[in-house]
Image (spheres, helix red, strand yellow):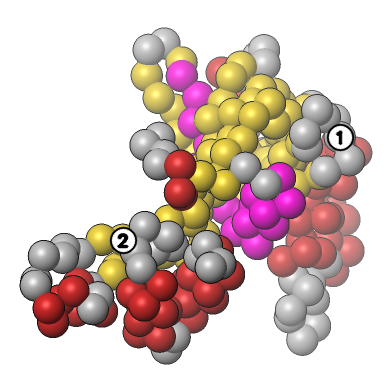
Amino acid sequence: MYLPTHFKQENDSELFDLIEKNPLASVMVIHAGEIEANHIPLELDRSQGKLAVLKGHIAKANPLTDILHQPVSAYVIFHAEHAYISPNWYEGKQEHHRVVPTWNYRVVHVQGTIRKIEDEKYLRGVLARLTRTHEANQENPWKMGDAPNDFIDDELKYIVAIEIEIESMVGKFKVSQNRSQADANNVAKALEDSTPEMAKSIQKYFPKP
């Protein structure tokens, strides 16, 4: 990943926060000279591993299941908010017109070892926690116990748990840090209605004078 110093984010707390708030990950492994890519919601467990462990599940029919007959290296990307940035928002547009469009975004790249866990108790725990987390904002949160036991038992036959032990991670928080304070303020203001999360990120991560 191209990573200019001013966009580099290495604070573990900030990186973990992005992962937890944006759990749908792009998970990639190399197999037989080709990239196997999947998009998987993952749970972050900070209490395990060198840095932390990501946990999820995949369909047994997924080609990744067969690839994981032994642990392999994985590259995982988490995406947060992003927004198109118009040159019209820069002060220089009115003065000299030597400005161009760009795109702001925040991502975390993770490298680690992925393995499958063929243990029903472990799988049930992953499913229960993922469900509890993502149902939390529902008026009447759904839980696995709402479904008949025999139905859940049958569904479990078709999936398998996975975990990824994080070995390294880095973030790219591209939020106008390479612009002037005036330009960053203008961009944040322009995005307040359309992409409020990016507006907040510019205000939070722009270097303080």
Against 157, residue 42 (above or below) is below
- For the point 45% across and 49% down, the residue is 6
Report the amino acid beneath label 2.
Trp
Please name the residue shown 57% across and 53% down the image: 24
Q: Which residue is mark 2?
A: 103
Disc 1 residue crowd, few under 14, some 14–19, many 20+, Cα 10 Å: few
Q: What distance separates the C-alpha of mark 1 from that of mark 2?
A: 35 Å
User: Label 1 is placed on what type of residue?
Assistant: Gln
The local crowd at label 2, few if under 14, some if 14 to 19, many if 20 or more residues have their Cα within 10 Å, is few
Assign a secondary structure to mark 1. loop
Residue in front for this viewpoint, 159 or 133 = 133
Q: Looking at the image, which residue is at 41% across and 39% down?
A: 3
Q: Is residue 15 magenta?
A: yes
Q: Nearer the viewer, mark 1 or mark 2?
A: 2
Q: Quadrant of residue 200?
A: bottom right
In the rendered image, the residue lying farthest to the front is 209
